[in-house]
Amino acid sequence: MKRNSRLSLALHTLSHMAGGPDRLRTSSDIADHAGTNPVVVRRVLGKLRKAGLLISEKGHAGGWRLARQPQDITLADVYLALDERMVATQEKSEAPACSVEHALHKRVSSVLEEIEENLVQRLGETSIAEVRGA
Amino acid sequence: MKRNSRLSLALHTLSHMAGGPDRLRTSSDIADHAGTNPVVVRRVLGKLRKAGLLISEKGHAGGWRLARQPQDITLADVYLALDERMVATQEKSEAPACSVEHALHKRVSSVLEEIEENLVQRLGETSIAEVRGA
DNA sequence: TACTAATGCAACCGCAAAAGTTACAGATGA
DNA sequence: TCATCTGTAACTTTTGCGGTTGCATTAGTA
């Protein structure tokens, strides 16, 4: 696929579900629409399920559906559910040599953290219902 | 290194340069500080040079320095110089099957595009001088 | 009960992006 | 003339991730 594929896949799927929120869709159907395969779909949607955005039903005639109303699911919910940090770096415990360097390091990190928070806040202003709606 | 290493490296280096903007620093020194190697540094800083943020001088006693005052270099300048799209997907000309799907695809893309623009705008509000300054 | 169709999950393959590395040409000051 | 720096190309290594296969589990249905 392409870059940001997981977020893209999640957004597409949820937006698609926003029209007809009660219908159950199988990971196979979703995969066909998204041009990928069922396992990848289940991997991504599984995270959304753990975050309480989706409900999956096992067994015959099982599948996926929204856990809430489309207008109650924001892009921030999706973004956070996928646990991807776009601007802020996830710490890997690098120990800077001198303390001046260390202080600067923290400054840069905290600035990026602010930017990240700003991004999430912006994402929270849009629901998947709005994405779908014209 | 870690994720977002290029942006992180660029930001650290520029912020470091913001104190003592006239001093020339070699890619080797910078690499040592950043815990990487000179060629990687030159690769990243090369993009910043092409964007007019840095000046490099060849030969003996050569090195790198800021092309402008620290307060005149924003995080957006750096981000755009590196040419990395964090939220918006860079189109790879996927042809969606049905037209309904196509319309939805465009909606999602345009929403992500808006978010990206918002991010850049936010980045433009902070200069590397501010990052450095306590 | 047996069958079918779905999720959940683990294990692996393969590819592509990016860092790391080596090597060398060109520039420039000592 | 030599040492030191950038600029770049070529190659290797690492890593993340999509893709794939396989199988256990669950749940309708005949």
Image: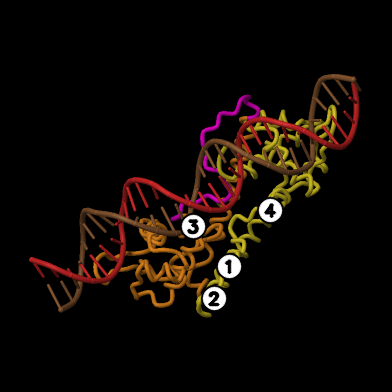
Chain colours: A orange, B yellow, C red, D brown
Q: Which of marks 1 and 2 is in front?
A: 2
Q: Nearer the viewer, mark 3 or mark 2?
A: 2
Reading the image, the residue beneath label 2 is B102
Q: Distance between the residues labelled 1 and 4?
A: 18 Å
Chain of the residue displaying label 2: B
Reading the image, the residue beneath label 3 is A79
Image point (43%, 77%), residue name: A19
Q: What stretch is highlighted in magenta?
A: A81-101
Q: How far apart are marks 4 and 2 (CA)?
A: 27 Å
Residue A40: name its quadrant.
Answer: bottom left
Residue C23: name its quadrant.
Answer: top right
Secondary structure under tag 4 reads loop
Residue B84 locus on image (x, y percent): 65, 53
Image point (56%, 44%), residue name: B3
Amino acid marked by disc 3: Tyr
Secondary structure under tag 2 reads helix
Magenta stretch encompasses residue B31: no
Looking at the image, residue C7 sits to the left or right of residue A45; the answer is: left
Amino acid marked by disc 2: His
The answer to which of A50 and B63 lies nearer the viewer is B63
Image point (49%, 57%), residue name: A79
Reading the image, the residue beneath label 1 is B109
Secondary structure under tag 1 reads helix
Residue B25 locus on image (x, y percent): 77, 31
Q: How far apart are marks 1 and 2 (CA)?
A: 11 Å
Evaluate whether label 1 is on the same chain as label 4.
Answer: yes
The answer to which of B46 and B78 lies nearer the viewer is B46
Q: Which of marks 1 and 3 is in front?
A: 1
Q: How far apart are marks 1 and 3 (CA)?
A: 15 Å
Residue B112 locus on image (x, y percent): 58, 64
Reading the image, the residue beneath label 4 is B83
